């Protein structure tokens, strides 16, 4: 499956980078007799990096990364430990796709300023971009340990767990292709992360940032580096809207939703979960032979509970979607301790809120 970068509405407060204060490391003067001119020179030297970092921030906003990096390097030459400058350097390196250098920069920040959660979060993004989800998970856990109220890290950690789950379900299906439970769960995880919520946001000069657009390599689930309005102002409104209606990704995610519903229905049947099974039928379900709903449900309950075991295997043939209606055609293999059957089945489903529910069920054909 082809995954597309999708910023997961990573919210960044305006105070994010403000907390990364410049921390001068000038040694205490040990000798008396300092001239006033020397003091003035010292203040001028301190002001110069601040100006460089301010200019670099503006250039970064404008997408002029080479020029921004020149300013950053000039400032860091005078104040090499400056946290704001180093943080912005990491963001620029990420935009330039110099990921090993970006990792080194953010790693250095975590070592020198372990109390700041943002560098840990950005390291997690870079590790995830390389497919190293264990390292990404560890970095996010450190970010949360540093600041338990850091919502961005919590959300990104959830995405990492989902990606790890996807890998586990893939492995389970490699070992047992008939595992309907794993098929259902895998389809649901894929549905969560297939359609991008937006393309990468472009720099905005007018609107303060709440969503950061700087991202790394395409991953699923995608997560976004923490940035700030001080170092870079991005707005999702500046980004071109992702096409949802007819795009291949949109079709894939909708098909996955229908597929997940069918597999969950089959899994409830296999598990002899009568209530769960009946819950997949719409209120408007057309019962066979003109039975009223109560009589039909009683009949299904008896047929599900009678066998000691049931196993349903589903092999999809086609899924067609028109608006809020869908048709799923598949081969259904039914096995119990008393009966084995294999036949074609067609389900017509309707969209009800966030769920797909069965409206008609037909065997054969």
Image (tube, grey):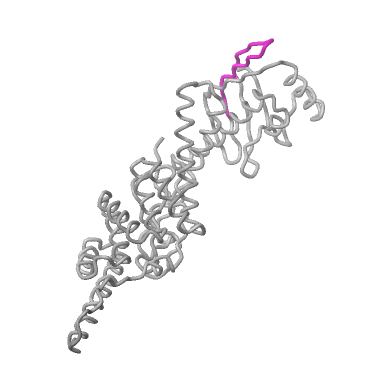
Residue at 70 percent across and 28 percent down: it is 273
User: Where, by quadrant of the figure, is residue 20 drawn?
Assistant: bottom left
The magenta stretch spans residue 306? no
Q: In which quarter of the image is the N terminus?
A: top left
**Which x, y percent locates residue 113?**
35, 61
The answer to whether 90 appears left or right of 187 in the picture is: left
**Which x, y percent locates residue 304?**
72, 21
User: Where, by quadrant of the figure, is residue 89 drawn?
Assistant: bottom left
73 vs 40, nearest the viewer: 40
User: Where, by quadrant of the figure, is residue 301 drawn?
Assistant: top right
| Relative to 260, residue 57 above or below | below
- Total of numbered circles in the picture? 0
Assign the magenta stretch its main secondary structure.
strand
| Relative to 262, residue 121 above or below | below
Residue at 53 percent across and 39 percent down: it is 254
Q: Quadrant of the C terminus?
A: top right
**Which x, y percent locates residue 69?**
23, 63
186 vs 206, nearest the viewer: 186
Residue farthest bottom in this picture: 36
Residue at 60 percent across and 40 percent down: it is 324
| Relative to 14, residue 224 above or below | above
The magenta stretch spans residue 331? yes
**Which x, y percent locates residue 266?**
62, 26
Residues in magenta, as a range: 328-344
């Amino acid at each position: 499956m082809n995954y597309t970068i999708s910023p997961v509405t990573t919210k960044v407060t305006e105070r994010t980078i403000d907390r990364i204060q410049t921390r001068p490391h000038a040694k205490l003067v040990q000798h008396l007799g300092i001239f006033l001119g020397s003091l003035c020179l010292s203040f001028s030297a301190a002001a110069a990096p601040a100006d460089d970092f301010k200019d670099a921030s503006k250039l970064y906003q404008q997408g002029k990364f080479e020029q921004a990096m020149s300013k950053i390097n000039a400032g860091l030459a005078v104040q090499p430990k400056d946290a704001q400058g180093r943080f912005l350097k990491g963001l620029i390196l990420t935009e330039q796709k110099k990921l090993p250098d970006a990792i080194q920069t953010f790693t250095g920040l975590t070592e020198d300023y372990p109390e700041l959660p943002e560098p840990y979060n950005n390291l997690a993004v870079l590790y995830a971009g390389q497919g190293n989800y264990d390292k990404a998970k560890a970095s996010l856990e450190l970010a949360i340990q540093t600041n338990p109220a850091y919502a961005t890290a919590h959300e990104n950690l959830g995405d990492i767990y989902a990606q790890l789950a996807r890998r586990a379900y893939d492995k389970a299906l490699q070992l047992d292709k008939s595992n309907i439970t794993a098929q259902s769960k895998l389809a649901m995880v894929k549905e969560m992360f297939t359609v991008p919520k937006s393309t990468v946001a472009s720099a905005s000069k007018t609107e303060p940032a709440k969503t950061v657009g700087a991202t790394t390599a395409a991953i699923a689930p995608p997560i976004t580096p923490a940035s700030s309005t001080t170092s870079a102002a991005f707005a999702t409104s500046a980004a071109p809207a992702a096409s949802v209606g007819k795009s291949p990704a949109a079709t894939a995610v909708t098909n996955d939703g229908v597929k997940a519903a069918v597999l969950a229905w089959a899994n409830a049947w296999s598990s002899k979960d009568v209530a769960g099974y009946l819950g997949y039928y719409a209120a408007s379900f057309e019962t066979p032979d003109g039975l009223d709903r109560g009589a039909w449900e009683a009949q299904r309950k008896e047929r599900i509970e009678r066998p000691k075991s049931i196993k349903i295997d589903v092999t999809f043939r086609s899924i067609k979607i028109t608006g809020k209606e869908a048709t799923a055609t598949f081969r259904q293999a039914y096995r119990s301790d008393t009966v084995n059957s294999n036949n074609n089945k067609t389900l017509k489903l309707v969209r009800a809120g966030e769920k797909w529910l069965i409206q008609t069920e037909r065997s054969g054909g």
